[in-house]
Image (tube, helix red, strand yellow):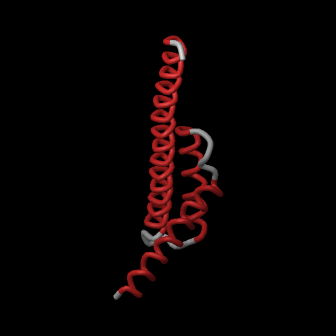
Amino acid sequence: MTRVMKREISNLQFYKDIKKILAEARNKAYAAVNFVMVEAYWNVGGRIVEEEQEGRHKAEYGEYLIQNLSKRLTKEFGAGFTEQNLRNFRQFYLIFLMRRFATHCVAN
């Protein structure tokens, strides 16, 4: 094998090593961002539930709250904050809150 061929093979491996490092970092970043966004949506759902439970149990208030929040968030943050998505965030919070409570009760 010539010196040039050895260098090319070495450069190819070097490139593959760098590519692997960057691909792994990108995957870790995607996973971290996904986790943070899921956590944020759960927290948004929780805050909606808290606001609804501030003594204003009427369905009309809940609808107004969701509609108003959807308009404001969409204006400031863009797509993704439809009324249905906000209801989903709320439901997501309630489901996992109940699971957490059930798990705690079973453990004790």
How many tags in the picture? 0
Question: Which residue is drawn at the image coordinates 51% and 42% (left, top)?
Answer: 27
Question: Residue 106's quadrant in the figure?
Answer: bottom left
Q: Is residue 71 left or right of residue 106?
A: right
In the rendered view, tell whether residue 4 sits above or below residue 40.
Answer: above
Residue 18 horizontal/vertical position (percent): 46, 29
Considering every residue shown, the one lying at the far left of the view is: 108
Question: Which residue is drawn at the image coordinates 54% and 45% (left, top)?
Answer: 73
In the rendered view, tell whether residue 95 sits above or below residue 18.
Answer: below
Q: Quadrant of the N terminus?
A: top right
Residue 44 horizontal/vertical position (percent): 48, 57
Residue 19 horizontal/vertical position (percent): 51, 30
Residue toward you, 22 or 13: 13
Question: Which residue is drawn at the image coordinates 48% and 22% (left, top)?
Answer: 10
Residue 32 horizontal/vertical position (percent): 45, 47
Residue toward you, 2 or 83: 2
In the rendered view, tell whether residue 96 sits above or below residue 106.
Answer: above
Residue toward you, 54 or 43: 43
Q: Quadrant of the C terminus?
A: bottom left
Residue toward you, 84 or 40: 40
Considering every residue shown, the one lying at the far front of the view is: 1
